Amino acid sequence: MFSSQALLSTILLSTTLATIANPVVLGNNIVKTSLTRHFNTSNARRTFREARTWKLNASDLVQESIDQKLLVYSATIGVGNPPTSLIPQRLITQAIGYGGGVFEGWEYLDRVTVADDFVIVNQSIGVANEVTFTSELTSKVADTLNPSVNSTVPTVLDNAFDQGIISNKVLGMYFQPTTQPNLTNGGEITWGGVDETKFIGDIVYTDVTTTGVSSHFWGINSAITYGKDLQLLNSTAAGIVDTGSPLLYIATDAYNAYADAVGAVFDDDVGLLRLNATQAAALKSIYLNINGVQLEVTPNAQGWAHSINPAINGDVNMTYLIVADIGEPSGLGWDFILGYAFLERYYSVFDTENNRVGFAETKFTKAIVL
């Protein structure tokens, strides 16, 4: 997840300390980097079956069930030239407020290379010696530190802007729908602006919300309806845009209303709502009303791709829905999470300078993905 107060708290969604993977300079101080998608088939069934339990404590949120390992996008980032032993700056201990866990290790300062013309100097990097969770993609945690209440640590985007590498504190994010376990060039991150070849029409912007827990992240306000008439969440609902969650999560009362409306049953073996072919054919669109503009999640976009069903212990003849229960009632300032299932259908923009989030349609927004 990206915090609105510490953009890009991780160098990327998952980072390998190695050589650069063919980034492209677009001009006007904008660089794009391809992302590789990793779908963890060995973890999928357990992940979906686990109950998601949320605890709200003041302005912090702890998620007891970690699901980020199911679907991960990664890029290759260079650290050092070549990677070298680093001189520790200070010992750090940091709690992971979202996703759960704690890591302890050292803070380092070194060069971070995204492209030949995108080299950040004196970037703060946290390297964990001990963690309460493990990654199946990397053996160590390597990320930039979130600013704490006692100090501010410049993020990758902060330093890139301050050092004149990019002209704007803007990230553009592009993902493709999941139809196979692993895919090279399955997504793209654009530093300093947007890639106009990846979206269609205009970008719809909305300010970061000031409501509750969501205001501490890339949170937005949006009404959500099923079809034209069934309101699941009203316009005061607040939620987050999250590149660390696989599904579209909504508050429990909204989830129950949606499940009843579509006639879905919960599949204990998979951990998702399930529809038969007749029910799937009758699905209506979901609409998000963001800053007065309706963003449509089509019936096809509400279903997990059938080609992935065997990997999650599902029946190829059934449709497994990407709408899931957030685990708390609405009205707590944490009403929805727009994860990969949504972001794979819309281009997203994280604009730190103007404290806003943007969305635009892509060629996948209304595509039929099987």
Image (cartoon, rainbow, N blue to C red):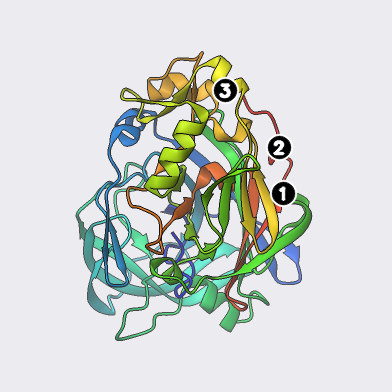
Q: In this view of the protein, which residue sits in the foreground, 156 or 252?
A: 252
Residue at numbered disc 2:
366
Q: Secondary structure at mark 2?
A: loop
Q: In terms of image quadrants, where is residue 23?
A: bottom right
Left or right: residue 41 versus residue 173 is left
Mark 2 belongs to which amino acid? Lys
**Vertical side of 109 occupied by 217: above or below:** above
Q: Which element carries disc 3, helix, strand or loop?
A: helix
Q: Quadrant of residue 108?
A: bottom left
Which is more foreground, mark 3 or mark 2? 3
Residue 1 location (% of width, % of height): 43, 59
Numbered circles on residues, count? 3
Q: Is residue 201 above or below residue 49?
A: below
**Badge 1 vs badge 2, beta-carbon distance below 8 Å:** yes
Where is mark 3, residue-wise?
280
**Which amino acid lies under the numbered mark 1 shown in the image of this protein?**
Glu
